[in-house]
Image (cartoon, coloured by chain):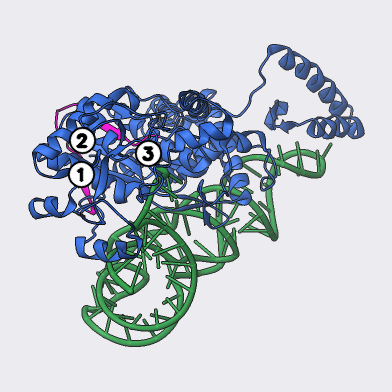
Amino acid sequence: MSSELHIYNSHARAKEKFVPITKDHVGLYVCGPTVYSEPHIGNVRTFSSFDMIYRYLKFLGYKVRYVRNITDAGHLTNERGEGVNRMESQAKLESLEPMEIVQKYTVNFHTVMNLFNALPPTIEPTATGHIVEQIEMVEKLIENNFAYEVDGSVYFDVTAYNEKHPYGELSGRKIEDLVAGYRDLDGQDEKRNSIDFALWKKASPEHIMQWRSPWGMGFPGWHLECSVMSTKYLGQAFDIHGGGMDLKFPHHECEIAQNKGCYDKGGARYWMHTNMLNFNGQKMSKSFGNSILPMEFITGSHDLLDKAYAPSVIKLLFLQTHYSSELDINIKGLQDAEKAWKRLFEAKQIVETLAGTAKQKTATSDKISELATACSDSMNDDFNTAKVMANLFELSSIVNSMKGGQIALNDVQEQDIALLKKTFTDYLIDIFGLTEPKQAQNDKLDEVMDVVISLRKQARENKDWATSDKIRDELAEAGIQIKDGKDGDVSYSLN
RNA sequence: GGUCUCGUGGCCGAGUGGUUAGGCAGAGCUCUGCAAAAGCUCGUACAGCGGUUCAAAUCCGCUCGAGACCUCCA
């Protein structure tokens, strides 16, 4: 709990106070998607988490440069030199050019992130757009004796590097353990050591995606682009590097090694790792084939789902769990989140209609400002959105009490109402990026409903309960809920 | 095999030494013509065993259980 932002730095394995390198500015790099197929809902969790982090940093007043790459150069699917290129294999599968695959799934990724109301990064560089810089970095690593060339391919010399810098500092691995672990995977390798990783890979003639380099035609290794693009746009030392937990090793470990091998600096000061999303207890992953696509959630078109769920419902479900915890989603959780979503936004709506008349601070004023402060304290405590949500629910309760008369409005100040409005808007809209539940989209429906509601009102006045209940029940079947408030005011909402 | 994480009430899920997490579900009450919505109240949880402490879900040890990474993955 603090009024200053603290971040769990997975490199230090501790929560640390966040101090940017340049005052009022933050450099944030997040490993983006490999655009060879549609992102699944697990990918969306990661990028939603960083969207929330990006939004909050901006909310705090930082000028944020947010770089998230697009991996569009095919890298190896394994380290045995089989040269399988994901972009190319998918291209063959779909009978498209590799760059058509890249374009198709880049557009798809953007569409999905838009649906989930994620802000675009300020720079979204592509791997293929930075081949020259990647070659330069490889040359520098060779020059520094941390890399060697074998038959048109270049490898990072982990053993040589480990003499100067500790390899495994991020993931907590020891080089001996790694060597032991790799032994059985050793094939007819051209690498000096099994733990060495590719920086540049020689391309066989049938490879479509290949570039000219000092070592012949080839393509970059898969850890290289992030080192290159993060340092190019954010500097050799920058603030935050994020990504999914599964990238911690080897990807991020290799990034640090490349950076230190090149610049003597490891790049980011704070490393943030978001945790995985499970469905029914199992990690959702492309390689498990159990992934549900974002569009399948939104349309409800998947056998494991009972109905469609709005992107905000899914986001709210994410927010109720800390980003660094594993999250297992299931239908029950989605249904719960949907109700919670409606409850919060209803409170937000109600607060717009309230006016406080108290002249002085009251116990309610104190409670409201206490909860509002708790929200920012929780965010500052390593983005504890789950706790923020808890506080927002308590505020909703207060709002409902005001509407219901349990809390008198002459016991509330105008400033209290203003603070409520601000808190709901700040967190729900600006920081969490949630959207309102579906409202009546056109005025015509409002007019129609006015007629229906007044007919029902008439029936009720005549104690014609059969008619008034018929209207209510049939509207409910059509997905329109009638709510009778106090003093005869009637509202409706769409399911 | 190596490295690491976790085990919280019916379900989900915060919390790291002493204070109500919260949501959903359930029970009772208030309001209502009846409902719905909303409000109030309630269940009193921390895998097991042992230890440290005035005090432990929270620290230490052991046992059991679940999972992650070590190979492409967000």
With A450 as the anchor, is A203 left or right in this view?
left
**Marks 2 & 3, CB-CB < 8 Å contact:** no
Residue A256 marker:
1
Query: Under tag 3, what secondary structure?
Result: loop
Residue beneath disc 2: A239
Confirm whether residue A160 shows in the render. yes
Query: Relative to the observer, which residue lies in front, A248 or A115?
Result: A248
- Magenta highlight on residue A107: no
Report whether A261 appears left or right of A492.
left
Q: Chain of mark 1?
A: A
Answer whether labels 2 and 1 touch (C-beta < 8 Å): no
Q: Which mark is residue A75?
A: 3
Q: Label 1's element?
A: helix
**Local crowd size for mark 3, using a 10 Å CA cut-off: few (<14), some (14–19), many (≥20):** many
Of callouts 2 and 3, the N-terminal one: 3
**Mark 2 or 3, closer to the camera:** 3
Residue B63 lies, in percent from the top left, at 40, 83
Magenta residues? A13-32
Image quadrant of residue A293?
A: top right
| Residue A371, placed above or below residue A326 | above
Residue type at the position of mark 3: His
Which of label 2 and label 1 is nearer to you? Answer: 1
Q: Colour of chain B?
A: green
Q: Earlier in the sequence, mark 2 or mark 1?
A: 2
